[in-house]
Amino acid sequence: MSADRTEWMQLQLRDHEEVAAAMGELLPRLRGVGELLIDAYRGAGILYTFGNGGSAADAQHLTGEIIGHYKRDRRPLPAVTLSTDATTMTCIANDYSYDDVFSRQVQALARPGDVVAAFTTSGRSANIVGALRAAKAKGATTVLFGGGDGGPSKEFADVALLVPSTTTPRIQEMHTFMLHVISEMVDAWVDGDGEYP
C-alpha cells in the first residue's frame, strides 16, 4: 500500500474520531430517546423506522435489535421498518409517487403512543419529510436520526439527534453508535424488569 493511500486512511480515521468526540453533547438527548422508546413500550406502543439507502439499512438495524435482542436474551418488542415491504413500497411508488412511500404507511399504521423514527443523512428527502409530517398529524412521537442542520425534516421531529457532521459516512457511523446505545437501554430495561443504564 502506498504512503498516499495510508495517509488518506489516516485522514478518514481522524475525521471519524473528531466526529465521535463531538457526540458527547448529544448524549443527554440520546438517553432521552432511549427513555422515550421505553415509555412507548410501557404503553404498548410500536416503533416504526425508515430511511433511504444506507439509512434504510440503519433503520432496519434498529428494528432487528428491538425485535430480536441486542446483548441479552429477552422477549421481542414490536418494531417495523417501512422500507422492507417491497410490494407495498412499489405499489405506493407506482400508484402515487416515491415521495409517498413512507407517509402512506405511516398514515395507515401509526397512532398516538407509537414512535416513528427517520434515519437520514441530509434530512432533505421528500419521502422522509412527508412521513415525519404524517406521523405528527397522527399523534405519534417523531425522532430524527440526522446530521448537520437536519434539513426540512427537523421541523417535524419531536426529538432530533443530529450528528455534528455533513459527511455521509461519518453521520451513518454515528447513527450506528446511537442505535446501539438505545438497543442496550431497551435490552436492559426488559431484562432488568424496569432498570436500565
Image (tube, rainbow, N blue to C red):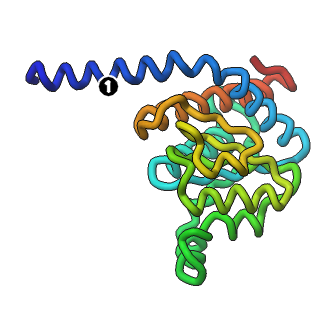
Q: Which quadrant, please, contains the C terminus?
A: top right
Q: Which quadrant, please, contains the N terminus?
A: top left
> Which is more toward the observer, 181 or 5?
5
Q: Residue furthest right?
A: 43
Residue 43 in the image: above or below residue 25: below
The residue carrying mark 1 is: 12
Residue 143 in the image: above or below residue 171: below
Residue 47 in the image: above or below residue 92: above
Q: Residue furthest bottom?
A: 95
x, y percentage for residue 173? 47, 32
x, y percentage for residue 119? 58, 46
Which residue is found at the position 8% from the left and 23% from the top? 2
x, y percentage for residue 112? 88, 54
Residue 78, can we see it?
A: no
| Left or right: where 10 falls relative to 78 | left
Q: Secondary structure at mark 1?
A: helix
Q: Amino acid at mark 1?
A: Gln
Q: Residue furthest left?
A: 2
Which residue is found at the position 57% from the left and 62% from the top? 126
Which residue is found at the position 62% from the left and 39% from the top? 65
Which residue is found at the position 15% from the left and 26% from the top? 5
Indicate the quadrant where residue 135 lies.
bottom right
